[in-house]
């Protein structure tokens, strides 16, 4: 489907494995492509990834342009950005999506600058719609939706006159579609046109550290806010999380105060989670926190203030002192 302005996803891989954020973006790309009547394509860069790339088909990718070279086994900014730029120039997608990860945030602005096109960072939603400027109507434009001004407004950003429209999306924001093993992807090998002189940095060693907490995968999260941030309340929240085989999350000020580390933070600048159960303990429920947990299947909120905004999205609300309530919940769950 050449010249059809397809939707393209930049595929990230680490240690030969495709990053989850790329699979989530393929789900979002599929929704956009269906609206536009175009296809989902991808660009993947690395070395010996061919077998791994076959799984992209299961997530709705129809075609992947693959650039394989031993020099590209580890990510470095300049060669990756040049390759993505060249791929976009050759295949002219209408929309390009990147993960708002360290790699995506490095590559996407370089590509946008080289192509002189728009780029919206950290989108929380993407839609296809119409945009009117004076008498001119732009149809089938990418509406790039994200919080702005510290989360006080939700802005819709469009760049209808520059092609492609490009956006980055944080991990966990888009829902990964269930894989369909019946679907296959066409893998198109592309020549690696970067020169040795483009490799300005050399990766000598990669030291990876396991995360102490995996909030994204947790089905139950007990999350502590500033109302549950003293050592006793944190210990109770941790105990309840462990009694429920869940994980301990928190709000941003709990991280900013040095009480828990960033891996625990839920929200706009933390992790986006979709657990079966989210227990918000002493969390007021500001928009930036809700942005990371509002899609939990069940929300229980504990707060001493009956007017706390968290109660507006909670399925069950408990008004009271967080320590009293956590103590009772731990006792009840342990008994059960
Ligand atoms: C750009 C930007 C990005 C941000 N990103 C994030 C983010 O990713 N995640 C995030 O969480 N925040 C984020 N914030 C901060 C956000 O705006 C709020 O300030 C924050 O979520 C508030 O945290 P909190 O609810 O724990 O604390 P508070 O707002 O201080 O609320 C504490 C709550 O605890 C209750 N409480 C107090 N004592 C008790 C008790 N004994 N028992 C029961 N309840 C009690 C109070 O009634 C209150 O509702 C961001 C802000 C900005 C500007």
Image: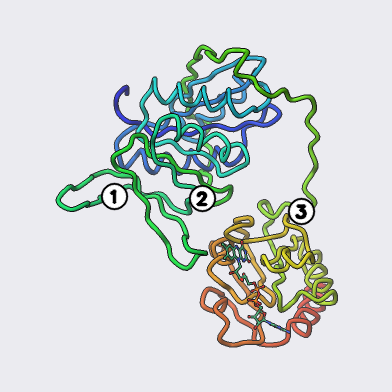
Q: Which residue is drawn at 78% across and 64% down?
A: 258
* Label 2 packing within 10 angstroms: few (<14), some (14-19), many (20+): many
Q: Name the residue under label 1.
A: 129
SS of the residue under disc 1: strand
Left or right: 334 as drawn, with respect to 280: right
Distance Cα–Cα, label 1 vs label 2: 19 Å
N-term mark: 1 or 3: 1
**On residue 213, which mark appears?**
3
Q: Which of marks 1 and 2 is in front?
A: 2
Quadrant containing ligand 1 reads bottom right
Which corner quadrant holds the N terminus? top left
Q: Which of 186 and 19 is in front in this view?
A: 19
Mark 2 within 8 Å of ligand 1, using the beta carbon: no
Residue 216 locus on image (x, y percent) = 66, 52
Secondary structure found at label 2: strand
Residue 283, label in figure: none
Q: Disc 2 designates what residue?
A: 122
Along the line of sight, which residue is nearer the eye, 47 or 328? 47
Observer-nearest of 247 and 336 = 247
Question: Can you say which quadrant of the picture contains the C terminus?
Answer: bottom right
């Amino acid at each position: 489907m050449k010249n059809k302005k397809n939707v393209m996803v930049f595929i990230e891989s680490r240690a030969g494995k495709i990053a989850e954020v790329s699979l989530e973006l393929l789900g979002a790309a599929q929704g956009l492509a269906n609206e536009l009547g175009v296809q989902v394509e991808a660009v993947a860069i690395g070395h010996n990834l061919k077998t791994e790339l076959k799984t992209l088909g299961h997530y709705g990718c129809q075609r992947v342009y693959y650039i394989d070279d031993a020099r590209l086994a580890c990510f470095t900014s300049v060669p990756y950005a040049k390759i993505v730029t060249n791929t976009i120039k050759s295949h002219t997608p209408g929309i390009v999506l990147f993960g708002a990860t360290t790699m995506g945030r490095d590559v996407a602005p370089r590509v946008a600058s080289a192509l002189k096109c728009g780029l919206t960072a950290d989108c929380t939603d993407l839609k296809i719609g119409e945009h009117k400027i004076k008498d001119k109507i732009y149809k089938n434009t990418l509406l790039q939706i994200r919080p702005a001004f510290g989360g006080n407004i939700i802005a819709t950003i469009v760049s209808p006159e520059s092609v492609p429209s490009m956006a980055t999306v944080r991990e966990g924001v888009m829902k990964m579609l269930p894989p369909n093993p019946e679907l296959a992807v066409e893998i198109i090998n592309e020549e690696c046109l970067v020169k040795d002189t483009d490799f300005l940095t050399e990766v000598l060693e990669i030291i990876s550290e396991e995360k102490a907490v995996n909030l994204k995968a947790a089905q139950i999260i007990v999350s502590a806010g500033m109302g549950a941030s003293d050592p006793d309340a944190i210990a109770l929240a941790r105990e309840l999380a462990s009694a429920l085989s869940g994980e301990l999350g928190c709000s941003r000020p709990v991280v900013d105060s040095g009480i828990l580390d960033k891996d625990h933070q839920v929200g706009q600048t933390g992790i986006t989670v979709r657990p079966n159960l989210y227990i918000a303990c002493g969390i007021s429920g500001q928009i930036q926190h809700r942005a990371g947990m509002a899609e939990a299947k069940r929300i229980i909120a504990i707060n001493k203030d009956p007017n706390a905004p968290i109660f507006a999205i909670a399925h069950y609300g408990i008004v009271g002192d967080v320590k009293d309530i956590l103590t009772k919940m731990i006792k009840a769950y342990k008994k059960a």
